[in-house]
Image: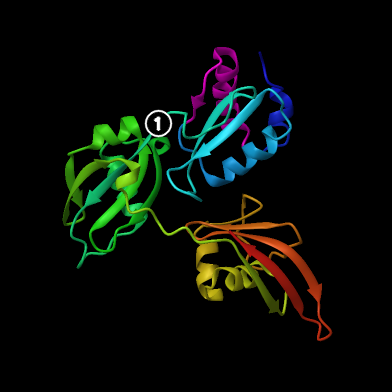
Amino acid sequence: MHLPKEKILFKSPFRKELESLLHFAEKALNNREAIWTPFVSSQLIEEVKNKFDNLNDISLLFEGGFPRAERRKICFLRSEEEINSHSIDIPIKGIYIKGNFLFDRAKQNDFRDVLYALHAQEDEIGDIWLIRDRGAQAICSKKCADSLNQKNGNLREVEISIQALDISEMEIPFNRPEKVINTVEASTRIDAIASAGFGLSRSKINTQIKKGLLRLNWALNDQPSKSVNIGDHIHLEKKGSLKILNIDKTKKERWRIKLLRQ
């Protein structure tokens, strides 16, 4: 059985990535079993949801270790199979990267680079979050977590050790509920809207844009002055997403904007 490849790839900015994922989907169909992909980005997940939404033969399950994880694995399986995450073996595990960072603060990407140095592959690693000044925890594939277990190393001058964990043993990041935000702005510029929605200053948002961390409708946006429209999605790495629910002009020629923060 084959999926409509050209229809799925048509006008997609993620053509190469989708081609790779199609192999997993068709394997699930032909072998009649649940097939898991490596970890993929949140923007690719949104593209997969859009492209596979109307296909009758295939069903999808997304799992990143905790609700609203940005990087997740995709499980492809035949539509007649019941989707139940509790009955499907999810090939993920946790790790704790321990170290004393009280006097030498580190960021998520610093810990990610350490894992790369220990020969972990990018698509084996899900989300990473800090555990105060004691290091960080991360979601990995089971194979990756087991291979990293008990390894030691250094992050700059700090000695680290890695311990594999079951997901139930981890300090999962706080799951912020969805929130509707109403704001009035002088324009519909993306930096103004993102500032109001994420609760960050305009200068901080502009810095994030320059670093390539903000996406509009899952496409990289490097223009702070870009105008947004109803239905647009703004994604800021490690901060979540905003959906533009409504835009109205006020009597004072300003813009009343309704956002859904996810």
Residue 126 x %, y %: 41, 43
Q: Quadrant of the N terminus?
A: top right
- By secondary structure, the bulk of the magenta-drawn segment is best described as helix
Where residue 123 appears, x then y in whole percent?
A: 42, 36
Query: Is any part of residue 13 visible from this angle?
Result: no
In the figure, 214 relative to 181: above or below? above
Q: Residue at x 60, y 73 (%)?
A: 196
Question: Is residue 27 covered in magenta?
Answer: yes
Q: Relative to 157, is 32 on the left or the right?
A: right
Which residue is tagged 1? Answer: 91
Expressed as whole percent of the image width and height from the top left, the position of residue 146 reads: 26, 33
Number of marks in the image?
1
**Does the magenta run of residues contain 28?**
yes
Q: Residue at x 50, y 71 (%)?
A: 204
Answer above or below: position of 218 versus 26.
below
Instruction: Give the colouring mode of the picture.
Output: rainbow
**Please, what is the three-letter code of the amino acid marked with disc 1?**
Pro
| The C terminus lies in quadrant | bottom right
Which residues are the magenta region? 13-37
Report the residue at 71% width, 57% height from top: 232
User: Residue farthest to the right?
Assistant: 251
Q: Nearer the viewer, residue 80 or 34?
A: 80
**Residue 220 visible from this viewpoint:** yes
Does residue 227 appear to the left or right of 135 in the view shown? right
Question: Which quadrant would residue 182 be assigned to in this image?
Answer: bottom right
Q: Is residue 112 left or right of residue 71?
A: left
Q: Nearer the viewer, residue 89 or 197?
A: 89
Residue at point 65%, 66% (across, down): 190
In the rendered image, the vertical position of residue 5 relative to residue 190, given as above or below? above
Q: Secondary structure at mark 1?
A: loop
Q: x%, y% of residue 97?
A: 25, 49
Q: Please rate how many residues cluster around mark 1, counting C-alpha atoms within 10 Å: few if below 14, some from 14 to 19, many from 20.
A: some
